[in-house]
Image (cartoon, grey):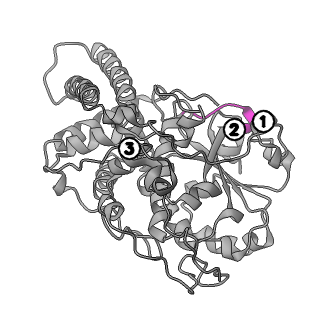
Amino acid sequence: MVNGVVEQYEKGQLNLDGTLGHLTTKEAGQLQILWRKLLEAFASDASELKDAPAAPADTAQSTAKRSMRAQASPSPAPSGKSSNSGSWFGFGASTKTEDESYRKTVGQVAPAGSSAPEFVAQGRARSIRDVFWAATLCDHPDVLVLRFLRARKWKVDDALKMLLACLRWRLDEEIDWVVWTGESALNYALMQRGIGAMHKTDRLGQPILYIPVRQNDPSAQPQEQMVDYTVYLMEVARIMLHPPAEKVCLLLDTTDMTMSNMDWTFFKTFLHYLEHYYPECLGLVLIYNASWVFNSLWKLICPLLDPVVASKVHFAQSTAELQKFIAPENLSIEYGGSNSYKYQYVLPRAGENAKMADVTARNTAMAARLAACDRLEAVTRKWAGIDSATSSSQTLSDERAAAADDLVVASRAMDKFVRARTLYHRTGVISDDLTIHW
């Protein structure tokens, strides 16, 4: 059987079926129907959203609202005790005693004046409309909606249910706070280890996300901080997913890993988030240099994988196999490539988030984006058949495409006022207008 994912690399051509600008007539019709149903739900209070899908057993759960947890005084790290809560069924648990860095955040180490201003939580009840437009961030709205349609095999009602559950999760988990606060609330030692570093692209133009498993220590930080980091990482990755490359290439390096490096809780949480809240964001999983430890665990991992995700997993035991997917100039020397990149965490700098404190400029940018949302929503209501229209369907489609492009421009202009700068801003990969410079 031909693996469609691998075949893309053999042909050197990204499969764009079902993505914006590459829809069949039937798929375009399904997109239109989904928008109609979504718009009809817009006026409802967000509190009416159904709970997000229950996470499976052994996944990490938030213990409190993120903003409240960050403001609370951290409890002291356990002393003289080891943790095995994240290990594989307790086997291979780390015996390392938790030290003073256990809960230390980037904000506690970074220079004064480097953090974002205090986040002002939304006090009033929010409509589904509010939550949706907040969730799009800098994405083209159709790109976001199409992810859910593809994930649910173009079944409109299933896609709508999934999308609304995702909105509920984002509201409950205060994802807007994660974006606003950025790295200052994240575990400092975790940021230094480089688990989930992004650098360059694969042969299809998809950003590469590196996970050196040997750098992971489940006992080195509280479980909720690992969850916070995971969400933050996914939100940063969204900035780098520009059509036509809407997915990431995940390089899972298992070199020198031991049982104590494997975090069962994190792994299941990561899969749950990918499936339910960040669908259609994974293009390829390269498992590099699979050790005997990983091979012994693979039989446990396989049943957890969605068949679509499983089809994207490829084992690469050599540099030559890696280079089938990643060009040598984009692959670091560590993996046999010619790129000199080596991960190094750069602390936030004093004043880097000063624009977020400019209330006048922020309100102006937010008002401009809200106006762009209103314009797109108005033409979409006509295009979807909710409001009467005198223009032809092609004219409406053209007007809608222009309005969506205007929204993306307005969203990018607002981003620097509502998102704390990231490592990738500081190293020049992401510019203020969100263009990517690898």
Q: Which mark is residue 298?
A: none
Seen at 44% across and 36% down, the residue is: 351
Mark before the other along the chain sequence, 2 or 3:
3
Q: Give the secondary structure at mark 1.
A: loop
Q: Which residue is mark 3?
A: 116
Mark before the other along the chain sequence, 3 or 1:
3
Q: Please state the horizontal and vertical placement of residue 251, each as a whole percent of the image.
A: 68, 51
Q: Is residue 279 visible?
A: no
Give left or right: position of 211 versus 150.
right
The residue furthest bottom is 80
Quarter of the figure with the C terminus:
top right
Q: Please state the horizontal and vertical placement of residue 409, each as a whole percent of the image.
A: 38, 22
Residue 178 vertical position relative to residue 296 in the rendered view, above or below: above
Judge the density around disc 3: few (<14), some (14-19), many (≥20) Cα neighbours within 10 Å.
Answer: many
Seen at 75% across and 70% down, the residue is: 295
Residue 201 vertical position relative to residue 404 in the rendered view, above or below: below
Give left or right: position of 160 versus 283.
left
Q: Please state the horizontal and vertical placement of residue 127, each as a whole percent of the image.
A: 17, 46
Q: Which residues are magenta?
A: 8-16
Residue 111 vertical position relative to residue 94 in the rendered view, above or below: above
Seen at 83% across and 37% down, the residue is: 338
Camera-side residue: 209 or 423? 423
Camera-side residue: 386 or 269? 269
Instruction: Give amino acid for label 2.
Output: Asp
Camera-side residue: 152 or 264? 264
Does the magenta-highlighted stretch encompass residue 357?
no
How far is the residue under mark 2 from the one under mark 1? Answer: 7 Å
Q: Which residue is mark 1?
A: 327
Q: Mark 2 and 1 residues: CB-CB less than 8 Å, in contact? A: yes
Q: Which mark is residue 202?
A: 2
